[in-house]
Amino acid sequence: MTVNKEELLNSMRGGLIVSCQVQPDDPVYSMDFVLKMAQAAKWAGAVGIRANSPDQIRMIRENVDLPMIGLYKIWHESTDVFITPTLDAAKEVYEAGAEIIALDCTDQITAEGEPAWHLLEKVKKELPDALIFADVSNYDEAERAVNLGADIVGPTLYGYTEATRHIESPDLREFARMCRDFKDRAFMVMEGHIYTPEDAVKALYLGADAVVVGSAITRPHLTARRFVDLMSGLQNNWREAERSKHNVQ
């Protein structure tokens, strides 16, 4: 698969990328549901899709003509690194039809005992035609990812690492700083904790090249849980369900 990287990035500039993902233990799980979400996103004017696992990526790729950010979530009890954690996983994502591969590029340690960001250089070497989307959790990780040649950088994992687990809202000030410092070297994407169109517009105003929205659009069970959590006096944290591990090996 050969793509013009600059043209692909420009096609997404200023737009909405919809994360269409579903896990086998989700109450809405079905392959048809994943496809319908992606088709609805295109109908609405989305400029790209973010999808998980080779089978879901392949199905969407065959039916929806939009740029694809692919990842492969694989959970292990020994680590919190789950977004495309190995070179083999990255290859499967690419072979399924994703032009863009999302990787955990945080300081977290993988099941193999290496910092997650080590994989970025390996994937760039093995899959030079792919674009790399570095999922990070803070400014320093973003800076390192840019220096290592990531094509796209976003604070996707802000709120999912041990240091940021208590977070429920996006750190817009930190994201704005990332955009000011790195936008001339990487495509900056706001992803994580964006729940309204107004939040997305704020991100664009602060420098985002594009915005990814997932749960607020495509995971109705988590949207409902968010309502229930607040209406019941915050007795339970709905984000525990969002962070839960799935196919643990």
Image (tube, rainbow, N blue to C red):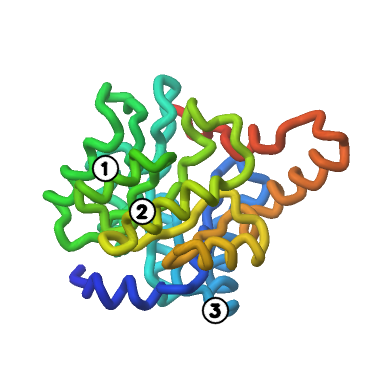
User: In the shown orientation, is residue 201 left or right of residue 74?
Assistant: right
Q: Amino acid at mark 3?
A: Gly
User: In the shown orientation, is residue 124 left or right of residue 52?
Assistant: left
Which numbered dot is residue 153? Answer: 2
Q: Please, what secondary structure does the residue beneath circle 2 have? A: strand
Name above or below for residue 202 compared with residue 232: below
Residue 244, percent from left and from top: 57, 33
User: In the shown orientation, is residue 191 left or right of residue 235?
Assistant: left
User: In the shown orientation, is residue 27 left or right of residue 249?
Assistant: right
Q: Please, what secondary structure does the residue beneath circle 1 have? A: helix
How many residues crowd mark 2 within 10 Å: few (<14), some (14–19), many (20+)? many
Q: CA distance from mark 1 to mark 2?
A: 10 Å
> Residue at the right extreme?
232
> Which of marks 2 and 3 precedes in the sequence?
3
Residue highlighted by disc 1: 144
Residue 26, percent from left and from top: 62, 44
- The reply to whether residue 208 is visible in this rendering is yes
Residue highlighted by disc 3: 45
> Which of marks 2 and 1 precedes in the sequence?
1
Q: CA distance from mark 3 to mark 2?
A: 22 Å
Tell me which residue sits at (87%, 36%) in the image: 232
Number of marks present in the image shown: 3
Res 98 quadrant in image: bottom left
Res 23 quadrant in image: top right
Query: In front: 160, or 99?
Result: 160
Tell me which residue sits at (62%, 58%) in the image: 218
Q: Quadrant of the C terminus?
A: top left
